[in-house]
Image (tube, rainbow, N blue to C red):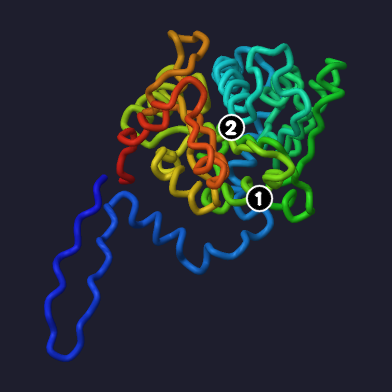
Amino acid sequence: MALRPSRPVQPATRRLRAPAPPPPGPILAPLRRFLASPSTAASPAAGASVDPREAAKFGALAASWWSPSGPFAPLHALNPARVRFVRESLAACRGGDAGAPEPLKGLRVLDVGCGGGVLSESLARLGASVTGIDVAAASVAVAAAHAGGDPLVAGRVSYRCISAEDLAASGTGGFDAVIASEVLEHVRRPHDFLAVLASLLAPPEASPGAAVIISTINRTPAAWAFAIAGAEYVARVVPPGTHSFKKFVTPQELAIMADASGLKLWHASGMAPLGPGGAWALTGALDVNYIATLRRAGEVQAGGAEGPGAGPGAEAGAGAGAERQ
């Protein structure tokens, strides 16, 4: 939304006042004020982003993580699309070959909110050394047990029951990629959460092209109809109450949070099912599910490169948000 221009300065007899800055648009103003407030400028406390209710909700479903017809079936259907995005995006960030048998070979990847390890295992098979973390101990146990059934995966993935904040506080970091897939809409203080993810990246001199990848849900009427009304109450493919519309994040909000963390939204794609119950694909529409690559601001400004095959993805998100009700 365009910003309204400020009114001309009126002459004064006693003191000449400088013109006030133009007021931000109604969508972005509350978020900018919140990001700039002193209470959010300090380093977040350990586990500050963790919502205990969300952790308990997913922990209670832990036994169903690998059930093809269980509550996580939509996540399994979505997984190939997000894996493709990660593979192509990280290859583009680092000048690699996305079509190589193991395009992520040699990369240290952190999967935040790994759940039962669905994404972690896929990335390990692409050559990455994966650390999966989750605050639900039951989910971590399921992930570790499942990985143990595949020697290739077991040698490339490890799991810890820990929050991103606690991991950062422990001094662990230096990752080439930090991924939080279908997590942002379940945390408290998402701006602090994103800052922690950025802090877990390896420094530029050690890992040029390091990136944070986020997949989440836009806050639009279409997202409410598809992800809440349709998925939770009509088709009942996920349990009612899985999502909260007010916690969905628009691409514009994600871009502002990224800026505050020293990152830039470099590339984004939508994700949508090809048909009822079918596999998902990457699309150019960001109005419901979308996935985005965030890179260090300095690298993006210096390189001026666009995302893989796409540049329009992030551009499409410019008008895809809806005002918070």
Residue 299, placed above or below residue 141: below
The residue that appears at 73% across and 16% down in the rendered structure is: 102
Q: Position of residue 206 (x, y in %)?
A: 74, 42
Furthest-front residue in this view: 302
In this view of the protein, can residue 58 be seen by the observer?
Answer: yes
Query: Which quadrant would residue 207 be assigned to in this image?
Result: top right
Which of the labelled discs sits on residue 210, or is there none?
none
Q: Tell me residue 77's x, y (percent).
A: 56, 15
Quadrant of the drawing holding the N terminus? top left
Q: Residue at x 19, y 63 (%)?
A: 6
Query: Mark 2 — residue?
Result: 181
**Residue 135 position (above or below residue 216):** below
Q: Is residue 82 left or right of residue 287?
A: right
The image position of residue 281, as x and y in percent, is: 49, 14
**Residue underneath mark 1:** 199
Q: Residue furthest bottom?
A: 14
Q: Earlier in the sequence, mark 1 or mark 2?
A: 2
Q: Is residue 59 visible?
A: no
> Residue 112, position in %: x, y?
66, 38
Q: In this rendering, is residue 190 above or below 160?
A: below
Task: Name the amino acid type tagged 1.
Answer: Ser
Residue 226 location, quadrant: top left
| Horizontal arrangement in the rendering, residue 297 relative to residue 253 (left or right) | right
How many numbered marks have been drawn onto this rendered protein structure? 2
**Residue displayed at 78% across by 48% down:** 172
What secondary structure is found at the residue carrying circle 2? Answer: strand
Choose mark 1 or mark 2, whichever is in front: 1
Label 2 amino acid?
Answer: Ser
For numbered disc 1, what is the local secondary structure? helix
Residue 64 vs residue 287, the one in the foreground: 287
